[in-house]
Image: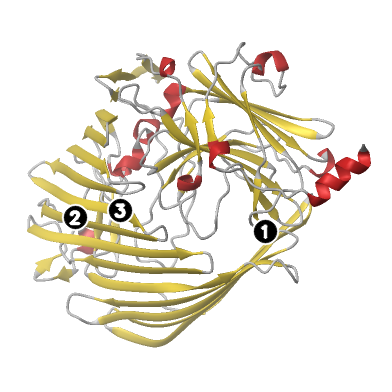
């Protein structure tokens, strides 16, 4: 019998999951699983069992050296998913870290796209010690792990495998209960770092296709799941402080509910004292304002809807709201978002050609932001954006249109145009740090001038297995501003072209090699060449989980009426983890550059 099994394993041809294997109907579990890292048969009875993962990295489309199974079902108002990852427990890598703080561990990932447009994928993941990871992946492949959903996860390591269990409430998936949408796209991924970082996918993925979720499987949901639910969260708070016989009371509240199909959130006098502080950034030798990511819970819900190629909306510009209202929702093929806020301390980010300035202020402002996007085909959309901010007798208005088109599998085109109208404050004391700057017949200081401007960006990408190319064009007029955004410079027209070949030799210790060529040219609106650079970069990935990136640039630049024709920069970064308990990061940079 053993000889027969061995003979069949040698001569039988393994094939990855086919389309029929990737259509899964979600089933009702007989019992509610307890999320404890123990996959009990009686809890997962009647569920689906998926397997036959395909290796993607380092060698594409082969059978992985170890097996992975997924258990799937629902109970009540939650989706339940379990992973069984067969392996030698002595080789499993695991690190106990904070939520979303990635290490190069053994991990499992769930990708869920509840909408057919595939513009947004929700990611849930964990490692063998049950650290929760969750984020949002957009259609460009950019992942944002500042998103925090409500879900439970647990994991354990056993004698010849490790397991992970997930409970994901359906309300955390932000799908509409109405309409005829019954099919989600789903992908299961296992990461296994050994001699190199190995990735296994349940639905086979090709390197010649940049879209992960268009190659994903299909999860068919029963009609009984689409039940209308209502939930209201009301969180009041109050703080009493007594100092030198003086009493100070600070009170407020936050309310969140589902109203007419919209996720509605209102806050009054919010307290953000518990929010993690911004990570320090190096501001030496830079003339531009620093960007800090949003972390406040009120603004995190649905924040990807307001993010566009031009940073026209930066919610941290609503700095200290006395009250705010936010509505986000989806109706058929439309995503809609609205924010209205009254800010008691309104900051400014003012862009110029060679510098930008972040200015705090005690001025009060009233802001409104409206955003709508409509699906076009698969992973394509068209959107509109309107925003206003009024500060005393000054104001800023913006209106824009944007689109993303994915076509012929390998190509994507992004374009956005934003028009702005600004009435400056009449307060040169507030603008004293840039009163001396003049531009386009205007003064830089806040002296009540009225400015009209525009900005546009175009981004074209070509993505193939052995070649990646990109063309980016930006055009920001000297008078363009967005007080509710983060615009760090204007008065430029810039084009960047980059691309090059890549290969996957899987020999001589190399798993991937890429060569990138860059060219950048930048002019201002007086048609003066401000910068021209050419660069070459080499990317190597190999055994021992080793990655080497080296880049050399030659730069010509004009700054403050001075011309620097022979600037250059060379940098190299190396990461390696040849042993389970040892890794090394190395970064080296040497350059001849401008001292700002």
Residue at 24% across, 71% down: 492
> Is residue 146 found left or right of 431 in the rendered image?
right
The answer to which image quadrant residue 300 occupies is top left
* Colour mode of the rendering: secondary structure
Residue at 71% across, 35% down: 128
- State the separation of the CA atoms marked 3 and 2: 15 Å
- State the separation of the CA atoms marked 1 and 2: 44 Å
- State the separation of the CA atoms marked 3 and 1: 32 Å
Residue at numbered disc 2: 418
Q: Position of residue 188 (x, y in %)?
A: 58, 39
Neighbour tally class for label 2: few under 14, some 14-19, many 20 plus, Cα within 10 Å: many
Res. 404 mark: 3
Residue at numbered disc 1: 59
Which of 558/128 is in front?
128
Q: Position of residue 424 (x, y in %)?
A: 11, 53
Res. 339 mark: none
Name the N-terminal-most of marks 3 and 2.
3
> Is residue 149 found left or right of 589 in the rendered image?
left
**SS at circle 2:** strand
Name the N-terminal-most of marks 3 and 1.
1
**SS at circle 1:** loop
């Amino acid at each position: 019998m053993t000889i027969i099994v061995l003979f069949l394993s040698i001569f039988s041809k393994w094939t990855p999951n086919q389309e029929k294997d990737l259509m899964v109907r979600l089933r009702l579990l007989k019992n509610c699983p307890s999320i404890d890292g123990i996959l009990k048969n009686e809890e997962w009875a009647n569920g689906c069992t998926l397997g036959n993962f395909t290796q993607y990295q380092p060698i594409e489309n082969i059978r992985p050296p170890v097996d992975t199974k997924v258990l799937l079902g629902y109970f009540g108002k939650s989706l339940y998913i379990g992973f069984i990852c067969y392996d030698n427990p002595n080789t499993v890598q695991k690190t106990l870290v904070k939520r979303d703080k990635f290490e190069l561990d053994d991990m499992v990932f769930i990708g869920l796209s509840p909408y057919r447009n595939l513009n947004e994928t929700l990611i849930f993941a964990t490692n063998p010690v049950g650290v929760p990871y969750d984020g949002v992946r957009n259609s460009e492949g950019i992942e944002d792990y500042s998103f925090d959903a409500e879900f439970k996860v647990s994991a354990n390591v056993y004698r010849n495998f490790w397991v992970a269990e997930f409970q994901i409430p359906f309300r955390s998936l932000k799908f509409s209960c109405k309409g005829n949408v019954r099919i989600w796209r789903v992908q299961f991924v296992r990461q296994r770092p050994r001699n190199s970082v190995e990735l296994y996918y349940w639905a086979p993925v090709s390197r010649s296709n940049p879209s992960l979720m268009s190659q994903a499987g299909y999860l068919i949901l029963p009609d009984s799941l689409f039940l209308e639910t209502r939930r209201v969260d009301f969180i009041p708070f109050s703080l009493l402080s007594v100092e030198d016989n003086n009493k100070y009371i600070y009170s407020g509240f936050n309310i969140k509910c589902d109203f007419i199909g919209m996720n509605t959130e209102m806050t009054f006098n919010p307290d953000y004292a518990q929010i993690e502080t911004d990570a320090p950034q190096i501001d030496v030798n830079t003339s531009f304002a620093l960007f800090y990511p949003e972390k406040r819970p009120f603004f995190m819900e649905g924040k990807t809807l307001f993010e566009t190629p031009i940073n026209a909306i930066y919610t941290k510009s609503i700095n200290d709201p006395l009250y705010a209202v936010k509505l986000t929702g989806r109706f058929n093929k439309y995503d809609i978002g609205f924010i209205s806020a009254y800010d008691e301390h309104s900051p400014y980010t003012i862009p110029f050609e060679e510098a930008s300035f972040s200015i705090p202020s005690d001025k009060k402002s009233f802001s409104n932001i409206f955003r709508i996007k409509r699906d076009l085909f698969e992973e394509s959309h068209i959107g509109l954006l309107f925003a206003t901010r009024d500060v005393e007798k000054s104001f800023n208005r913006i209106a824009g249109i944007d689109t993303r088109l994915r076509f012929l599998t390998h190509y994507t085109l992004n374009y956005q145009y934003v028009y702005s109208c600004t009435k400056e404050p009449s307060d040169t004391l507030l603008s004293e740090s840039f009163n001396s700057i003049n531009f386009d017949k205007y003064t830089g200081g806040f002296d009540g001038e009225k400015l009209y401007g525009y900005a546009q960006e175009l981004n074209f990408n070509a993505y193939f297995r052995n070649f990646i190319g990109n063309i980016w064009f930006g055009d920001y007029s000297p008078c363009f501003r967005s007080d509710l955004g983060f615009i760090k410079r204007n008065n430029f027209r810039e084009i960047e072209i980059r691309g090059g070949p890549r290969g996957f030799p899987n020999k001589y210790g190399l798993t991937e090699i890429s060569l990138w060529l860059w060219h950048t040219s930048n002019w201002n609106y007086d048609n003066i060449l401000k910068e021209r650079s050419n660069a070459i970069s080499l990317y190597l990935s190999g055994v021992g989980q080793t990655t080497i990136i080296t880049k050399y640039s030659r730069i010509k630049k004009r700054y403050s009426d001075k011309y620097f024709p022979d600037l250059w920069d060379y940098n190299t970064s190396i990461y390696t983890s040849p042993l389970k308990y040892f890794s090394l990061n190395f970064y080296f940079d040497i350059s001849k550059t401008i001292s700002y």
